[in-house]
Amino acid sequence: MTVNEFSKKYELTPLSLGENIEIHGGFTGDLLSWVMANARENNAWFTVMGNINAVAVASLNEIACIVMCQDSNMMPDALEKAKEECINVFSTKKSCFEMCGLLYNELNK
């Protein structure tokens, strides 16, 4: 499933759009060092961490997209950097738990 397919199917609000990357898995976490060590390339990252360091981690790990869960906000400077780096960022009212479950079900059909 691609980032665009996932975001449309689950009505994610786009904040920054980059490439329409194929999602291979998901990762949930807010401790950036843990995400940096454990999230994999082409993962969708479900978080509430919206600072500029989150964008750096997403770029470093080649994350498919960041999904800001539970109506959390990305800081303006972080969102600007995400746009510069062409990193997909979305927001949703759903929890990280719910979003992981939805992605898991999609990838394991």
Image (cartoon, rainbow, N blue to C red):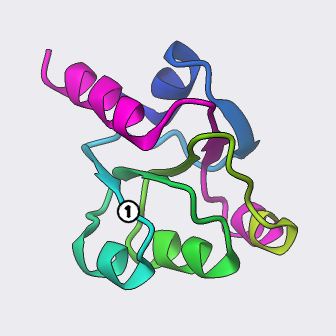
Of residues 67 and 85, the one drawn nearer to the viewer in this rendering: 67
Residue 9 position in % (x across, y down): 50, 14
Q: Residues within 10 Å of mark 1 (few under 14, many from 20)?
A: some
Residue 17 position in % (x across, y down): 69, 46
- Magenta stretch: includes residue 83: yes
Residue at (60, 50) in percent of width and height: 88
Up/down of 43 relative to 30, above or below: above
Outermost residue on the left side: it is 108
Q: Residue 85 falls in which quadrant of the image?
A: bottom right
Highlighted magenta segment, given as a residue range = 80-109
Q: Quadrant of the C terminus?
A: top left
Residue at (68, 78) in percent of width and height: 52
Residue at (52, 39) in percent of width and height: 20
Q: Which residue is mark 1?
A: 29
Residue 25 position in % (x across, y down): 25, 45
Say whether residue 71 is left or right of residue 48.
right
- Magenta stretch: includes residue 91: yes
